[in-house]
Image (tube, rainbow, N blue to C red):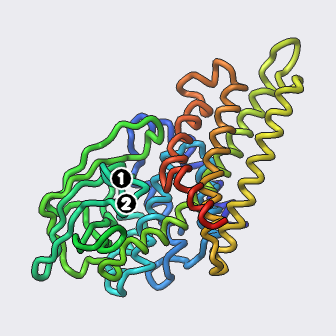
Amino acid sequence: MMMRDQVRRFVDREVVPFAEAWEEDGKIPRDIFRRMGELGFLGMRHATEFGGTDLGPIASIVFAEELARSGFGGFTASTLVHTDMSAIHITKSGTTAQKQTFLPAIIRGEKICAVAVTEPDAGSDVARLRTRATRDGDSWVINGAKMFITNGVYGDIIILAARTDPSAKGSGGISLFIVEKDTPGISTTKLSKHGWLCSDTAEIGLSNVRIPAENILGVEGRGFYAIMETFQNERICIGGICAGESAKAIELTLQYVRAREAFGGPLWNQQAVRQKLAMLAAKSAAVRQLAYHAAELSSLGTNCLREVFMVKALAPEVLHEVVHGCLQLHGGAGFMRGTAIERMARDARVLTIGGGATEVMLEEVAKRM
């Protein structure tokens, strides 16, 4: 595919040579987002009338897979949060005026987008969120806190979930809002992480944050269902991430064991090494096919909840097996900071948690058996 080739060239030329410095800085340069905007990468899920290219889930999974082949999970995460996990809410639920106001700058990479659902006491259990939005004349006033928010430090626009009807139980009474980051009352604390070091992650405080009434996104009280719908796209993207990172880890390890001399020849001469990599490659290929199958079903409008939950449950677990198996084959070198496989093993850890923990996903699969 032309798009796959274009993204791969961009990653090889404009990401991989520089991303180690981004890891040190804990920040991705804004110029990179603008460059991706120029190339049309940030608008694939948005309508052409606002500057997008109006592509579907297959484009998202290809994009995710090729970004992940960079080997820098933080870069992949920040980009996909912007394209497929936050701004996509505006396209799916926004009014024409909201789309005209916000999407062009998002698609050009001039404004960076985040999504704020998770809270200190509400993660996979979205129905527990406590952040409140209260109507006050022609404004909404928001109070609460959000946690683990990708692009939360340096981003510009937040798609934020808050409870608008405190009397509603469970998933009821939750709404979504478009919140501009420079609104008074917003504070951010940058979090230090195990992996994804170049991706900024924040705890966000909201104290009497006043936004225009027209910044509510979609139908009041129906935000939970919008979040769940977008989660399905996020989980398909995570399948693509796992496919790309697995392929890159195996590729790096194959190069290493063919060059590393031990026991009278290259490690590749050892049957155990060859069979280990062969099995990892087979499992990775199977997960990739499952992820693309789910993306195809989604693009056809078919109910594919079970398949998507399966992807999210299985793909990160297989990725774990791949990166840790590959690290083992690197020996002591794989344990050293500065090696790609060490970084990839750290970056992979969060994928069994973010977007719905493995255990939660397996329960959702079980409900549909």
x, y percent for residue 217 = 32, 77
Residue drawn at the location 63% of the way across and 76% of the way down: 303
Point out residue 38 in the picture as x, y percentages from the top left corner.
49, 66
Which residue is drawn at the image coordinates 64% and 72% (left, top)? 304
In the image, residue 93 sits, relative to residue 68, either above or below, namely below
> Residue 310 occupies which quadrant of the picture?
bottom right
From the image, state whether disc 2 or disc 1 is nearer to you.
1
Q: What residue type is labelled 2?
A: Ala
The residue wearing badge 1 is: 149
Q: Which residue is drawn at 63% across and 40% down?
A: 320
Q: Can residue 12 be seen in this view?
A: no
Q: Is residue 127 above or below residue 334?
A: below
User: Against 68, is 99 above or below?
Assistant: below
Specify the label residue 114 is tagged with. Answer: 2
Looking at the rendered image, the quarter that the N terminus falls into is bottom right
Query: Where residue 66 sits: x, y (%)?
Result: 64, 55
| Front in this rendered view, residue 136 or 12 | 136
